[in-house]
Amino acid sequence: MIAPRIVAACLLVTPLFLACSGTGDTPAATPAPTSSVDTATLSADAVKIAGVTLDTARILPWQAMVTVPGRLALDPSSLETIGSITEGRITHVTVRVGDRVAPGQALVMIHSHEIMDARSALAAGTALVTAMEAERDLAATASERATRLFDNKAMSKADVERAEVGRRVALSNYERAVADRDRARALVEHLAGLGPLPAGADQHDVVIRTPIGGVVTSREAQPGTVVLPGTPLVTVGNPSKLQIEMHVPEQQALGITAGARVAYQLTEAPGETFAARVVRVAPTVDTLTRTVQVIAQLEGRTTGRAETFVQAAITGRGETPALLVAARAVQALDGDTVVFVAEARGEGMHIRATPVRVGRRTTDRVELLAGVTEGVTVVVRGAAIAKAELLKRRDGGGE
């Protein structure tokens, strides 16, 4: 009874084996296609949870962008370094760093023999003008009298001419005396300034005054110090006129020119962004640091003070066109550089990892040299989640 059953089983298995092995007349079954591990379909809920945002690859003028540290500094055009105008010894310093001053305010007083000589010359010049004025008036009267007598035949022509010469000489002497007096007065005003002497000063003090209003930013003058003409004493500046000083690496400075936009944040308060514009790019490279100095003028308000450090993003002017995508759209996937091309699938989204070749980069944009064309929609925010989903599929986690 056992043998017939075995024979019958073998007869049943043999056709099935032949069919599976493809040696029979029945054709082999075609395997069902499998989805690519470099694609995935996200449901509407998954897209919402991931916070996916999309952007389009666009051809735009390439703009160089670099982020560098910088510092706020007083605009040199708003600074006035006030130096000594004479030789002498400092007797008084009336201001300190941080004091606000008005135009013409006394800052420093210097005891000097020059002011003494100038005041003496002014006094002598004033007295001489008075004497020359009297001689001028007397000579004018004599000339007029001589003319009347000549008209009445009571004086010769020669006497009239001598009187006229005397009048001209007296007038010339008077004008010269006036010029000497005015020169002495101007020297006194230069040394002592206009207006009354400040408290504590005397006639022998040269008074150094500020020509501009602002805030005292530095003070080198110290009472008792002997100074020479040109010695720096006090610096006054306008604290509201600031600029950003930056040092950009040589290669990154190639696309930065005057007029480039700058967005900066204060290091001590990074929550708010302010605007500036490049006004000067140094024509030379620093031989030690291989950097280029870039100066930017602030636009609008700022909460920073001079010598505050900032983080500045400089955007150069547009150059040659390039195919650009957002920097966050570019991801590294198993040694490849890819972007995730997105297509709508109902309320969900189908994504595909597309290898690309990249060129220039900035903090927020990347140039694409190959892989996608203009107008392709790519994932920007959520690209990292899309990458994780594809890696899971590659590891056999399924879709």
Image (spheres, grey):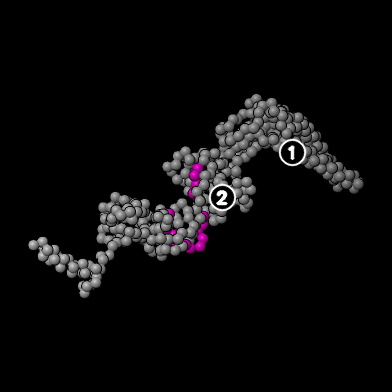
The correct choice, above or below, for 129 with respect to 52 in the image is above
Image quadrant holding the C terminus, namely bottom left
Q: CA distance from mark 2 to mark 1?
A: 58 Å
Q: Residue at x 12, y 63 (%)?
A: 3
Q: Secondary structure at mark 2?
A: strand
Q: Position of residue 215 (x, y in %)?
A: 57, 36
Give SS at disc 1: helix
Q: Is residue 320 left or right of residue 339?
A: right
Depth order, front residue of 12/22? 12
**Residue at image location 50% in from the left, 48% down from the top:** 67
Q: Earlier in the sequence, mark 2 or mark 1?
A: 1
| Numbered tag placed on residue 182 in the rendering | 1
Residue 161 as seen in the image, left or right of residue 198: right
Magenta residue check for 48: no
Q: Residue at x 46, y 51 (%)?
A: 363
Quadrant position of the N terminus in the picture: bottom left
Of marks 2 and 1, the one in the foreground? 2
Relative to 370, say whether 230 is above or below: above
Question: Is 204 located above or below residue 186 in the figure?
Answer: above
User: Residue 286: where, in percent of width, then height?
Assistant: 62, 48
Going by the numbered disc 1, the residue's amino acid type is Asp
10 Å crowding of disc 2: few (<14), some (14-19), many (20+): some
Quadrant of the image occupied by residue 178:
top right
Res 194 quadrant in image: top right
**The residue under label 2 is which amino acid type?**
Pro
Q: Residue 201: horizontal and vertical position, in percent?
A: 67, 26
Q: Farthest residue toward the bottom? A: 25
**Residue 62 badge:** none
Residue occupied by mark 2:
249
Query: What's the magenta region?
Result: 310-327
Q: Is residue 103 visible?
A: no
